[in-house]
Amino acid sequence: MRTRSRQKRERAGPGCSHLFRTMCEAIFSRGHLMFARLGLLGVLTSVLLAGCVTPPNARTDLLAFLETGKTTREQVLLGLGQPSASFEGERIITYRIGQYGEQGYYIISPRVVLPAQSASWQNVHFSLVIVFDENGRLRNHKLIRVD
Amino acid sequence: MKLPPCQSADGRLLVVAVLCAAALMGCIIIPVDYHATGSRHNITEESTNEFPIGVTTREEVLLALGEPDFVSEDSQRFGYFWSKVKAIWAVASYGTGAGGELTKSYLIQISFDSRQRVSDVRLLQNWGESVTETPGSR
């Protein structure tokens, strides 16, 4: 006579690992049906929505370190990463900036922009233009809204 | 001698009008005016008037418009591109249908001289998703 636990294992299917079998027993067990399904649903929802609701390192103080006459080109490159474009021997560099509500700004990496999308400004809210002087120090910068 | 309606000029015009109306019966065109997906919004046709020739520097252009969409290999020409949807069309007939957008594309081409000053500003525009140079465009 097959016990209830053996019936559960058989229902879970042959060849299941112990962990998967345990999960199957928990899901199909009448006593844990509701909580197990809710928990699994919650985990799956969190995983699926993680990329949607999490801003990519959005910061309100992303550009706070820029000080005219003080900030160097090296500090800008270390703080903001690779620019999306440069001109006049890197005397002028530009970045594409996104904005995530009140959570702040984030850099849209040039590696994310595919060649076919280089002319696309989708999800880009600003173009940051930074100008350096002959000594490599910040002379001027401007955040230009493009959306 | 008076011609029958189908052979007179007015009659032919009437027949053509009726045929066109019948062909377009399942077609709708809605005029709109908004930027296409992925287009920048900060440039208009009037932007060509913002850069006096011989005076404006490349730096001033970048600080005014931002990163250009296209740059020539020698960096002597910038291209700022945007596109707008001008109409939405749809046609339906016997259980099938189709629709789409009518897009107009614009390109401001700014050229610089050896002193890094603006030497030419040109506005190019074309129906569709790409821009080709048209004579007399500015």
Image (cartoon, coloured by chain):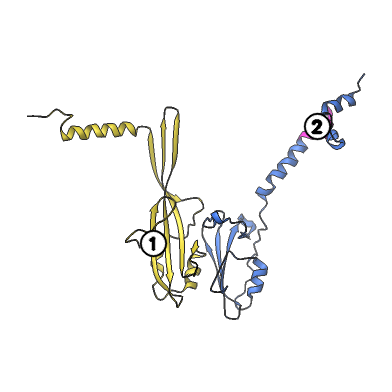
Chain colours: A blue, B yellow
Is disc 2 placed on a helix, strand or loop? helix
Report in which chain the residue with disc 2 lies. Answer: A
Q: Residue furthest front?
A: B73
Q: Is residue B63 left or right of residue B109?
A: right
Q: Quadrant of residue A27?
A: top right
Decide whether the magenta segment is chiefly helix, strand or loop.
Answer: helix
Amino acid under disc 2: Ile
Q: Quadrant of residue A143?
A: bottom right
Q: Quadrant of the N terminus of chain B?
A: top left
Q: Residue furthest left?
A: B1
Is disc 1 placed on a helix, strand or loop? strand
Report in which chain the residue with disc 1 lies. Answer: B
User: Tag 2: Cα neighbours inside 10 Å, few (<14), some, or many (≥20)?
Assistant: many
Q: Quadrant of the C terminus of chain B?
A: bottom left
As drawn, the label of residue A27 is 2
From the viewer's perspective, is residue B35 above or below residue A91? above
Q: Which of B30 and B54 lies nearest the eye of the viewer? A: B54
Which residue is under mark 1?
Answer: B123
Q: Is residue A128 left or right of residue B118?
A: right
Q: Which of B126 and B89 lies nearest the eye of the viewer? A: B126
The magenta segment is A23-37
User: Tag 1: Cα neighbours inside 10 Å, few (<14), some, or many (≥20)?
Assistant: many
Residue at screen point 66% across, 61% down: A59
Amino acid under disc 1: Leu
As drawn, the label of residue A63 is none
Whole-percent x and y of residue B78? 46, 66
Q: Between tags 2 and 1, which lies in front?
A: 1
Q: Residue furthest top?
A: A1
